[in-house]
Amino acid sequence: MPVAIDVRSVFKRYGRFEALRGVSLQVEQGEFFGLLGPNGAGKTSLISIIAGLNHPSAGSVQIMGHDVVTDYRAARRALGVVPQELVFDPFFTVRETLHLTSGYYGLRRNDDWIEEILENLQLSQKGNTNMRALSGGMKRRVLVAQALVHKPPVIVLDEPTAGVDVELRQMLWKFVRRLNAEGHTIVLTTHYLEEAQELCGRIAMLKAGEVVALDRTSDLIGRFGGGLASMRLSGAPLPAALEPLRSGEIHPDGRIALRIDDWQGLEPVLVALREGGCRIEELELEHTDLEDVFVRIMNEAPRAVAASNPDAR
């Protein structure tokens, strides 16, 4: 598959601090790709370099074959970025803002596409409203519209649903799914891991400036089979032999959760409970999801998981 984003051995240093430590990854054209990591992992630094807002200390990035440093004009035309921060010009209406953004890309007759974007993002009734008068959710819709105004083949969404209501979230994902189905490459960063699990075909995880996991979403989840056995016990406390399996604290209603790496391991747990004099009043099984995988990977050695499948595409 042709490559939409090609990141090769990228380092970013701020004095003695290394925000990125040799990050390499490729996003194929037409993918819905997730970029995940805790705060301070290097996601913002990487996105800033991809967007041409910052230069790498070493390494290279190409967008649709265009280097973001040496061929920056073509690279920026191929990219649309929805930033996490609400950045807007308070002197223009919504429609004027989109026409102004079109002008940055040399687009003179872009009215039809602007109106289509406004309709799909439910902004048509706000087209002549000054940006200052919009709610936070409406301003975020305008940021999405600005990123799409030049029909870029690659779209980066940096926490696009942070602090927005359910209606906007559903509307946004419906529109983004349509764009992806039409061939646009989507890169998503989010702390809502259920969104990443549902939307992204592949995921890269960053920790301390390094890629610690890169694989298909289903394979990442499948690598950590099993899940949690949530139960409420009576008759005796949890046997000491099962304490290492405990996940989290005791719930206010008395339930505890045990980590089961493989569902075949559930039977020995039940035997240990019975032999320890415990009666199971309630039992609920929860399959491993992306959030579980994320927490476990972040607790592992930085290079261990990536090394297990370094070229997953």
Image (cartoon, rainbow, N blue to C red):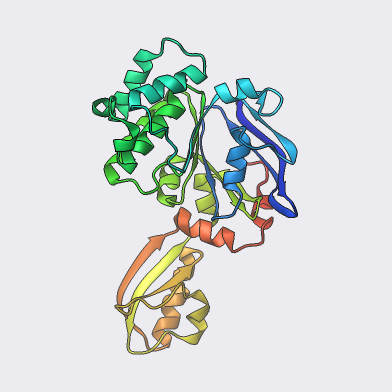
- Establish if 225 lies above or below 137: below
The image quadrant of residue 76 is top right
Q: Is residue 261 visible?
A: yes
> Does residue 279 appear to the left or right of 179 in the view shown?
left
Q: Position of residue 78 (x, y in %)?
A: 56, 23
- Establish if 13 lies above or below 263: above
Outermost residue toward the top in this view: 109
Q: Is residue 225 visible?
A: no
- Establish if 261 lies above or below 155: below
Q: Position of residue 39 (x, y in %)?
A: 54, 55
Q: Position of residue 37 (x, y in %)?
A: 55, 52
Residue sitting at 41 percent across and 46 percent down? 195
The image quadrant of residue 303 is bottom right
Residue sitting nearer the eye, 71 or 227: 71
Residue sitting at 29 percent across and 45 percent down? 166
Q: Position of residue 36 (x, y in %)?
A: 53, 48
Residue sitting at 42 percent across and 88 percent down? 276
Residue sitting at 34 percent across and 33 percent down? 131
- Establish if 259 lies above or below 100: below
Residue sitting nearer the eye, 245 or 78: 78
> Does residue 283 appear to the left or right of 246 in the view shown?
left
* Image quarter in which the C terminus is found: top right
> Does residue 24 appear to the left or right of 197 in the view shown?
right
Residue sitting nearer the eye, 88 or 189: 88
* Image quarter in which the N terminus is found: top right
Outermost residue toward the front in this view: 91
